Amino acid sequence: MSQSYTLIKSGLVIDGTGAEPFQADVLVQDKQIVAVGTDAASHASSDASITEIDASGCRVLPGMIDSHCHISFDHPNSNDELFFHRRYGLAALVAGVNAQKVLRAGFTSFFDADCVFDVGVDLRDAIEGGVIEGPRMTTGGNVLINCVGGTAARLLPDEGTRGYARIVHTPDDIVKEIHKQIKMGVDWIKVHVSGMPIRPTKDGGEISTWTLDELKLVCDTAHQFGIPVVGHCRNASSTRDAALAGFDMILHATYMDDEALQVVIDRKVPLVPTFTFQANLADFGAAIGSDANLREVFRAEITESVGTLRAALDAGVPLLTGSESGFSLTPYGDWHYRELQVFVEDLGMTPLQAINSATEQGARALKLEGELGCIKPGYLADILIFDGEPESVITQLGEQHRFKTIMKEGRIVDTSTPLPRDWQLPGWRVSEYSERVLTRELVESMGLTP
């Protein structure tokens, strides 16, 4: 019986390593890349059945990886909506459609940082089992948090679970919850190391809410079972302590000081800045009624953090791209590419460096270093045939019509069947009365008679 191959011919290869594009063919068999080069076809067996794809005039690059996504959230406008207006079974069904939107945006893999209920584990297994089409994914469970931390203020209870959060306070709480999540099958343990205080502090921004000993306990417990740990860290001390405790990846890592930066550099902890949410709010918040002061705060998080993040990159710290897709500001399928744009425009990366962050480096979030994220022999055949020049114009990666072929594990993804853009589900969205308070003064200022 002859073996079957796919030969992608005459494309300009961007291999994901940061190297300059080069002319080559790519030979794929089953789920893997077999050969890359002008003589790629010669690596097929003599009796092979070869299907050819003409990539003339196109770029051939690895499927991209979103290293910070929330696939179960479905675009909430507020924590109130996310915590109190989601249902288990419906969240899973909706996430299955939203995952396909991620895939069609050219992101063949993603890391689901935390989820409502246990949707991440269930969706991952459904995709892997062939029940539903979607990107390859790794997932956390409910984020470990204490009632002081997070970004939900008094919506968090003193104990129990709410939304994506599991409240833990004592060492016994921490160990028990980690054991429970590992038993269920999570790929990562996530900790909300910093959070917004109820009353603003004199320093502004978030505050650290975990001790170093507590963070070390998380790492010791998870690492015993070979499970990595990731942390939400949006101030200097939380980033420093997460790195010291042995965290395997840090989300945000904003507002680092010299001490935190040095610890991150010494330990080469991969960072996922995840600036897309902030950039969208800063640049486009006016279109959805966001407060002008809030827009300035989120822009400042970028401008005040790019210097230390760039220093980390220059010192050899891996930077990964994450979009935080799942909120009203970051809908699935629309903005995954934008983190690459921020890396180029704000961090000063070249487009090829940004693509490296979204491919080869992103494999760390999937726990597939050396197997995913490059156009190389032996790597998984996640391949994009792209009609454009992303090595020069990174924003082209946000134009979905340019993706001529999306391949995941050697199989071409069907992008012809339309997906629903939105849905009307009873109790799913929280409607707001208004954006402003309807005072008599406001009515009179509009020339109306009260």
Image (spheres, rainbow, N blue to C red):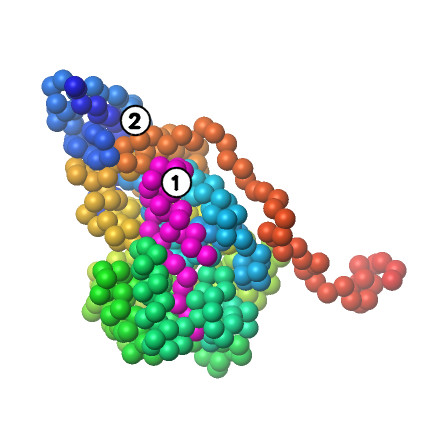
Q: Which is nearer the eye, 176 or 134?
A: 176
Q: Secondary structure at mark 2?
A: loop
Look at the image and say whether residue 139 sits in the magenta stretch.
yes
Label for residue 134? 1
* Residue 127: % across, % down: 37, 41
Q: CA distance from mark 2 to mark 1?
A: 24 Å
In the rendered structure, which disc, 2 or 1, sits on the residue that comes first in sequence?
Answer: 2
Q: Amino acid type of disc 1?
A: Gly
Q: Amino acid type of disc 2?
A: Ala
Residue 76 lies in quadrant: bottom right
Q: Which residue is mark 2?
A: 55
Per the rendered image, the range of residues in magenta is 117-146
Tell me if mark 2 has few (under 14), some (14-19) or many (20+) residues whose alpha carbon lies within 10 angstroms of its own: many
At horizontal 40% and vertical 46% (from top left) the residue drawn is 123
Label for residue 299? none
Look at the image and say whether residue 41 sits in the magenta stretch.
no
Q: Secondary structure at mark 1?
A: loop
Asked if 382 appears above or below 78 in the picture, the reply is above
At horizontal 47% and vertical 69% (from top left) the residue drawn is 160
* Residue 351: % across, % down: 32, 47
At horizontal 43% and vertical 67% (from top left) the residue drawn is 166
